Amino acid sequence: MELVDDRDENRDSERGEPFLEAVELTKRYEDGVLALDRVGLERAAHGKRLKGFSKGMRQKCALAIAILQDAPAILLDEPTSGLDPKAGLEFIRLLTDLRDEGKAVLMSTHDIFRAKQLADRVGIMNSGRLVTERSRAELEGEDLESLYVGYMAGGESAGPGPVDEEAACSA
């Protein structure tokens, strides 16, 4: 049992905890609530265990942790999978805000349209190998579906198909 000296101004006389420690815990709690609100997790879920959360809710919690840690870089794997269209759009807006705040956002995704919307640079990988990397400006007006499918079909370029060497030489 701890004895509390009521004369010590830095202690909370009811619980015996240092007052500044209690203030810090309160601040961290409030920061946590703000981060969970920012990522769009409903208030009713704030006090619940992650075990019962959907994948989308767990994605939001992971992003809230990154926000609380003030991480300079955020690495995401398929960040919008498991989210309904509205939640996916809100999540991309949040990632855009974080990018605009100077955070590096690196994500792997099959959602090439959202990648183009969010990314400063987009890379396409095939069989674990980076086959192309393009800036946002280079992707303007580009048919991303054709570009992606062209590389996934094994082509080194996103053209209409294999190049006829004879036709190329005679041109």
Image (cartoon, grey):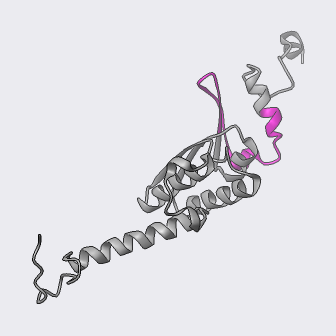
Farthest residue toward the top?
Answer: 166
Judged left or right of residue 158, residue 28 is left
Residue 13 picture location, percent across and down: 20, 84
Give left or right: position of 165 versus 152: right
Relative to 79, say whether 20 is above or below: below
Q: Residue at x 13, y 88 (%)?
A: 6
Question: Is 7 left or right of 107, judged from the image as shown?
Answer: left
**x and y, in percent, of residue 121 in the image:** 63, 45
Residue furthest out toward the front:
1
Q: Position of residue 5 (x, y in %)?
A: 10, 84
Q: Is residue 38 visible?
A: no
Which residue is drawn at the image coordinates 70% and 57% (left, top)? 87
User: Magenta stretch?
Assistant: 123-147
How many numbered marks, from 0 up? 0
Q: Which residue sits at x=63%, y=41%? A: 78
Residue 162 falls within the magenta-colored stretch: no
**View extreme (bottom): residue:** 7
Left or right: where 43 falls relative to 111: left
The quarter of the picture where residue 110 lies is: top right
Quadrant for the N terminus, please: bottom left
Of 93 and 100, the residue lying toward us: 93
Q: Quadrant of the C terminus?
A: top right
| Residue 24 image point, x, y percent | 31, 73
Residue 40 appears in the picture as rendered: yes
Front-lying residue, 3 or 28: 3
Identify the image quadrant of residue 22. Answer: bottom left
- State the image quarter where residue 18 is shown: bottom left
Magenta highlight on residue 124? yes
What residue sits 31% from the left and 78% below the top?
Answer: 23
